Image (tube, rainbow, N blue to C red):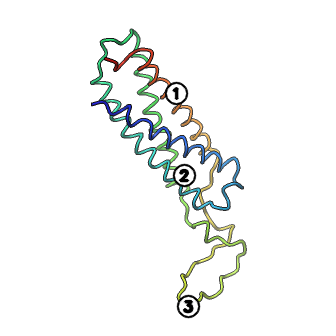
């Protein structure tokens, strides 16, 4: 059973969308400031699901490569297959580092909806209302989309496109897996 071609579209789409949102958040921070909690949630969810799908896609790709028919394959397919595997594993490393950076190195400690612009203490809460602690803006820590994250994201995009191109070359030009 060939699972790799069925699964690969999901991590590609999710990682592409998450990386595009991450880059937009860095390049145009004003666009994301109004709904930054929702935007950060979107990025984290899409990138997390994309990474999980990437792990499954690579595992199924390794099994499918071993079991796929190669009788009609053109000469020289092994080099392309090795580069395809190397770029796939590199995707794991790059996006793993990016997610580690987002969740461990620069974790959000305060939700953006709780940030105030003045260092004053909030008024006493109304009865039957939720108590929300306000934090001065200069002390609030949210995901900072820094230059290292941008470089990792762009490198991830480059590897994503390269891996897809190599996989397509294996199937459509070298006829690997075609019976």
Q: Give the quarter of the image for residue 116.
A: bottom right
| Residue that badge 2 annotates | 43
**Residue 158 in picture, x, y percent from top left:** 56, 32
Where disc 3 sits, the SS reads loop
Q: Who's the residue at 72% across and 55% down the image?
A: 30
Q: Is residue 89 left or right of residue 134?
A: left
Observer-nearest residue: 18 or 79? Answer: 18
**Residue 11 in picture, x, y percent from top left:** 45, 40
Q: Disc 2 versus disc 1: distance between alpha carbons?
A: 22 Å
Circle nearer the N terminus (1, 3): 3
| Residue that badge 1 annotates | 162
**Residue 176 in picture, x, y percent from top left:** 36, 18
For the view shown, which residue lies furthest in the front direction? 179
Q: Disc 2 versus disc 3: distance between alpha carbons?
A: 36 Å
For the view shown, which residue lies furthest in the bottom direction? 127
Q: What label sits on residue 75 in the rendered view?
A: none
Would you say the residues marked 2 and 1 are in contact, meaning their CB atoms lie under 8 Å apart? no
């Amino acid at each position: 059973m060939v699972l790799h071609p069925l699964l690969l579209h999901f991590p590609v789409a999710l990682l592409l969308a998450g990386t595009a949102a991450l880059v937009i958040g860095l390049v145009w921070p004003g666009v994301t400031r109004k709904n930054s909690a929702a935007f950060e949630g979107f990025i984290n969810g899409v990138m997390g699901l994309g990474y999980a799908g990437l792990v499954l896609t690579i595992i199924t790709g390794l099994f499918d490569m071993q079991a796929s028919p190669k009788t009609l394959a053109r000469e020289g397919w092994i080099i392309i297959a090795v580069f395809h595997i190397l770029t796939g594993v590199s995707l794991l490393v790059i996006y793993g580092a990016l997610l580690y950076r987002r969740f461990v190195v620069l974790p959000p400690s305060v939700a953006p909806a709780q940030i105030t612009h003045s260092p004053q203490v909030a008024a006493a809460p109304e009865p039957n209302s939720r108590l929300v602690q306000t934090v001065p803006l200069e002390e609030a820590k949210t995901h900072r989309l820094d230059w290292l994250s941008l470089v990792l994201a762009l490198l991830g995009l480059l590897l994503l496109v390269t891996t897809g191109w190599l996989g397509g070359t294996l199937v459509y030009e070298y006829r690997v897996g075609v019976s």
